[in-house]
Amino acid sequence: MEYREEDFLMISGIQHFEFCRRQWALIHMEQMWEENLRTVEGEIMHKNAHNGSFIERRKDVITTRGMRVFSSRLGISGICDVVEFISDKNGCEIYQREGKYRVVPVEYKRGTPKEGMEDVMQVVLQAICLEEMLCCQVDKGYLYYGEPKRRTEVQITEELRIRAEKDVKEMHDLLEKMHTPKVKRTKKCNACSLKDICVPQLMKNTNVNEYIERMIGSGN
Ligand code: SF4
């Protein structure tokens, strides 16, 4: 089965989904977004990654910034901060370029590597999209973190591919049912950019829109 373009989900949403299913639903289904330092700084880093020349060639590496990628099979699309095409005789052919290239996505993030898998899964989905679009094999990608200012390698393993595809399927299912998962209070809630909207200590079953309407309606 192939998804229609209008049903594509944002690749970057997997970060929210891996962090907390409810957070993903609040942002991507209920359109809630609470800007805090964490998200604003993250956006600045992304703008920097997208700045500069669109395509740059240095020795054996062609670098593209802000490349749009998608997978019709999974129903996802997004933008890769950076994709490197590294000259490699075992790589794949690229349209209008001589030679063969290894394809490597690089995602920019603020701060230090996270405990969870959210950033890793984003790179995995980018790799799957690049494979579908370019008919190539992507074995690894990188995460570039702002604070240590260095790359961390991400191996695109079979296990991670299965997990990423399962996440995406679950996201499509939730969206189809318009179901926002209930609050599950964990220590992650303290660092959550939506904690004031989600109100984990008050809400157990209702969705955010109902809660806000109730609060306004009651004059609180
Ligand atoms: S506050 Fe907690 S339950 Fe609510 S969206 Fe954030 S992480 Fe999820």
Image (spheres, rainbow, N blue to C red):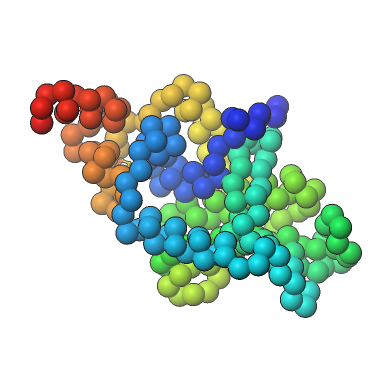
The quadrant where ligand 1 appears is: top left
Q: Position of residue 118 (x, y in %)?
A: 47, 51
Please report the residue visible at 55 percent of the width from the left and 70 percent of the height from the top: 151
Please report the residue visible at 47 percent of the width from the left and 48 percent of the height from the top: 15
192 relative to 83, above or below: above
Horizontally, residue 6 falls left or right of residue 111, namely right
Horizontally, residue 21 falls left or right of residue 151, namely left
Nearest to the observer: residue 77 or residue 119: 77
**Residue 56 visible, this orientation:** yes
Horizontally, residue 58 falls left or right of residue 108, namely right
Nearest to the observer: residue 156 or residue 196: 196
- Point out the residue furthest to the bottom here: 59
- Split into 4 quadrants, where in the image is the N terminus? top right
**Residue 25 visible, this orientation:** no
- Point out the residue furthest to the right here: 98
- Point out the residue furthest to the left here: 219
Q: Position of residue 186 (x, y in %)?
A: 28, 45
